Amino acid sequence: SILFPMVVPLLIDNKDVITDKLFPVTQSSTGAVISEAVAATEVQVRLAAESSARAFVTWKKVTATERRRLLLKAASLLQDRSSEAVALQQLETSCPAYFAQHNVDLCVKFLEEWASLVTSTSGTIPVTESKAHLALVFNEPLGPVLGLAPWNASLILAFRAAALPIACGCTAILKTSELSPASHYFLGALFRDAGFPPGVLNVIHSAPEDAAKIVKALIEQKEIKKINFTGSSKIGRIVAEIAGKNLKPILLELGGKAPSLVFPDADLEKASKSVVEGAYLNAGQMCMATERV
């Protein structure tokens, strides 16, 4: 079982990797050390990048129907392991049970929705200057994608960062949050158990003091073709700068400013409850938490 692991391993080529380089994982509400996680070095970064590149050669050719089958299998397994996923999130991030369950329920819906979409990918036929010419535009998997996920909605944001590229025929490396490595490792173990081939999803942790170095090393790996980052604007700027220097596209979801507009004809009791919920759901640890009214 991966519930409450004493040591959270890396996942490379569908194999757990444990070294003697560990860092403590503390529970946010108590400050207690709840586990240790393996801290990747540049050696494991290189191994993960090579694994992702090898897997991409064959994964990009896997039929849409087979990808759909695996995604639905993962959704089914996630439902079966719902209590485990909820417990891991609560243990690491101290989130309320209802919020942890919401993460699980939404991820199941994500997987089912993505599974339904993989067979509908299409290209286009642009208009050409002459009837003698024919132009075709194909949508093809880009390559290994690096997903950088935060802790505050640990399951939702990890699935979105790593599972969606996989659904599209890419492979992925998930760089976990130092605050929720077990919750993020859960995704890798889930996909392994669902039958996804080795290297399709690799999971890398880093010690807090090594995070900047490890993220930079991951982005600079020649095999990585795109970066997906969710987090603060401050760190987003740094990640975008590294990606830009390496001429790699990046998708950023950073901190937002979320106002609530209350109009004169609104139901004030309902509006006030919605404003408070929007501001304080999950203790306000959401990028779209209400900031002003």
Image (tube, rainbow, N blue to C red):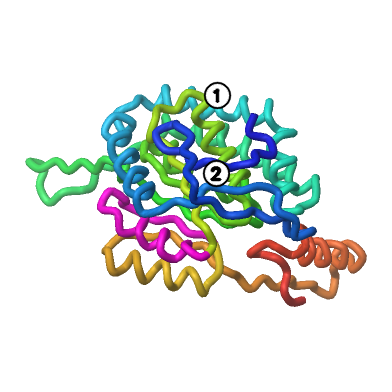
Q: Are marks 1 and 2 in contact (CB under 8 Å)?
A: no
CA separation in Å, label 1 and label 2: 15 Å
Residue 80 in view? yes
Q: Which residues are magenta?
A: 209-230
Instruction: Please tell me which residue lies in front, 57 or 220.
Output: 220
Q: Is residue 105 visible?
A: no
Corner quadrant of residue 1: top right
SS at badge 1: helix
Tell me the residue at 48%/62% (across/down): 211
Q: Which residue lies at the image location 17% right of the left edge and 43% below the top edge?
A: 135
Q: Is residue 136 magenta?
A: no
Q: Quadrant of the C terminus?
A: bottom right
Q: Quadrant of residue 190?
A: top right
Residue at horizontal 75 percent and vertical 49 percent from the top = 99
Say which residue label 2 marks: 159
Q: Is residue 117 above or below residue 216?
A: above
Q: Residue type at mark 1: give it.
A: Lys
What residue type is disc 2 on? Phe
The residue wearing badge 1 is 73
Q: From what the image shows, is residue 146 above or below residue 6? A: below
